[in-house]
Image (tube, rainbow, N blue to C red):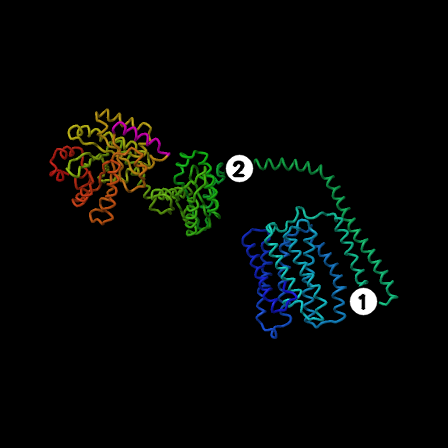
Amino acid sequence: MAWPLPPAVAAPIWILTQLVTVAVATYALTSREALHRSGWWVLLASCGLGLASAALHVVPAGEISDTAWPVALAARSALFVLGLTLLLGVRRAQPADQNFLDAAIVAAGLAIVAWAFLVEPWLSVDPPDARFIGVVACFGALDLLLLALSLRILTTPTSRTPTMLMLAAAAGVVLAADLASIPRVGTHALDGFQPGGLVFTAWQLCGVLVAAAALHPSYRHGYRRPDGGTDDVLPRARFVTFVFVALLAPVVPVIGLVASGLVRRESVPALVGAAALTCVLLVLLVVRLGNFARLAVRRAAAMNVQSAALMVQATALQQALNDQEALQKELAHRALHDPLTGLANRAVLAERLELVLLDSGRGPGGLLLVDLDGFKDVNDTLGHPAGDELLIRVADRLRVAAAGADTVARLGGDEFAVLLTETGAERCRLLAGRVIEAVREAYPLAERQVLLAASAGLLILDPARAEPAEALRDADLALYAAKEAGKNQVVEFTPRMRESRLRHAELAASLRAALADDALTVLYQPIVDLTSGQPVALEALLRWRTADGRDVPPSRFIAVAEEIGLVVDVGSKVLRDATAQASLWHARYDVAVSVNVSARQLASPTFASDVLTVLAERRLPPAALIVEITETVLVEAAGAAGELTQRTLTALREHGVRIAVDDFGTGYSSLAYLQRLPIDILKIDHTFTASLESPGERDVRFVGAILGLGASLGVPTVAEGVETPRQAALLRELGCPLGQGFHFARPCPPEDVLDYLSAPVAMRASLT
């Protein structure tokens, strides 16, 4: 400790001690969680104020006031009192909790002793000047609060943790130093409050105890008020303490007066008698208060016994009413909410949407429809229980992401809706983006991380909109547009979508009619050997010209066929027409026919047998048919959900049908898939071929890499989209064996194919 060292030595020790104390306490507060953290931060501020007061050391001794250090210590003491108050939960104390009042009573009694034997003699014998009286008064008030808080810790079992006891010890050290310094103020001015003095030394020890309390494991528990508050009956130990404190008020002043010699001897019996009678009266009052508390408890117990039977009956009746009410609420909830996720159902959404749209004075709002991308794969791979669990978790995320929305509903399956009212368009867009981001985060499910995405359609509810059915339809159109645009995004409704959907419906109806009327035609484009120029196969390409003479691109009507479920019928037509024509060409010209097959066709368990049946009917060997699939189908076949597709491809290949991967390089297949799955031909996408028209070194190397991959796998490679002699020449130099494109021939009808096949190589380009 710094005391009783001279200030020049005491100051560095003081600063070092406070620095270590602040560092340790800061570490404890920032590295661990605890109750009543605000109190700990105030205690840390008290220690920090002690460290900050070190700035007074740089002021020359002659220029600093004698009261500067006492003021700094008083401020630190005030913060220490505030911190203890917060730790003891004064703000959370209940009216029945009398512990603080009891501690204050005891502190007031002990203050009488201090006044009689310390303060009053000091004031009467050698009174100091006004500023010293102010210092003593300030520290006396703070010491009284410290005494009350320390007693509160010591007299309450729930407060007597090691941490709180160390804080009480810290307060006791400061209190003892202050009391010991009061008699010295008159004779030695404020020496005890200066660096190296008794009070200063006590605050150093106080800081060390605060740091030790913060480091103790019981630091995190803090003060816990017992359930139900304190007992109504006065405990025996506390009763005895109250009697003792009550006796201090009349006894201590008499003892002080007699000891000081200010009272004449003949007056002593009168003073003692009056004090004795006062003591008797105070003891009788305390006893009476204790008896009154016991009587109140007994009467309360009697009333409890009398009301027990009524409480049992009332409880039974209330339980019956509660059960009936709970049943009614459960039935109402089931009628209005989704049983799996607990969200509102479609009926609730429709009702609330109608109320919103019928409100003529309503503000802006929005309707968001959300559909999960890839949810079917979860059901297929992990099972429906896992899928249900995933839907529950998605619903929970939607509740959080759409906080403040009027309604969050599940419409069925993996489709959800969010209704926003009194919300501007920009906020609707922000919330829609937040919903998509929330769904996109990984889900820990079935001991793995499941990734999911969502598509959403947003409809801004302008004041002119009044029909709920139209609103739902338009939001659904926006959702459809989001899925059509690549999924995993939000698309806002525009009137053009309604027109586009109408055209889509008309196109679907026309496609159905064209298929029924056999108005779809199949053209054939040769696949040639780049070295000899001889055709080795013909790819069947479906074309559609409407009754009014418009050519509909295959990319458009095939997508429509996929959506309305006609793609299997369309694919079957192409297969039958192509094999019928190939039966005329194969035997004579040894050319195969290549047919594109969709994922839905391959998903049919009878597809392989159907293909072999058609080949048998046409009397075509299986080697005369090439089945083309996309990279997406290839990856699906390699996954767990594509087991049926993989078996179908394997069965076809085992019978001699060749499998080609179309548009290779545009998808995301891996070498492992190519090695494991039954593949016979790779077809390089036309975008890579087009890059060879004005090639850079990177373009040539990339095409060369694909060709090298095909060669290493032992499968021939076909370059699609060859349109110029320069492209064909570069492909020959790179070692590409086969090519297809306008440079060799355009797609032509069956009647022109025989002319093409029978013509010399030099004349074939002119024929097409």
Task: State whether residue 732 appears in this view.
Answer: yes
Q: Give the residue number, with chain letter if any, for mark 2.
A: 332
Q: Is residue 6 left or right of residue 705?
A: right
Task: Compare residues 479 and 146 and report the one nearer the observer.
Answer: 146
Secondary structure found at label 1? helix
Range drawn in magenta: 640-656
Circle on res. 260: 1
Amino acid at the residue labelled 1: Ser
Q: Is residue 474 left or right of residue 219?
A: left
Which quadrant, please, contains the C terminus? Answer: top left
Q: Is residue 290 above or below residue 677?
A: below
Outermost residue toward the bottom in this view: 62
Outermost residue toward the right in this view: 266
Residue 164 among magenta residues: no
Which quadrant, please, contains the N terminus? Answer: bottom right
Q: Position of residue 588 (x, y in %)?
A: 15, 29
Q: Position of residue 700 (x, y in %)?
A: 23, 46
Query: Dividing the picture into quarters, in which one does residue 190 lie?
Result: bottom right
Circle on res. 86: none
Residue drawn at (48%, 47%) of the image: 403
Q: Earlier in the sequence, mark 1 or mark 2?
A: 1
Q: What type of secondary structure mainly makes up the magenta span?
A: helix
The crowd level at tag 1 (other Cα within 10 Å; few <14, some 14-19, many 20+) is: few
- C-alpha separation, residue under disc 1 versus residue under disc 2: 85 Å
Q: Position of residue 260 (x, y in %)?
A: 81, 67
Query: Dividing the picture into quarters, in which one does residue 64 lie?
Result: bottom right
Secondary structure found at label 2? helix
Amino acid at the residue labelled 2: Ala
Q: Is residue 608 left or right of residue 695?
A: right
The crowd level at tag 2 (other Cα within 10 Å; few <14, some 14-19, many 20+) is: few
Q: Is residue 198 left or right of residue 48?
A: right
Q: Position of residue 755 (x, y in %)?
A: 13, 34
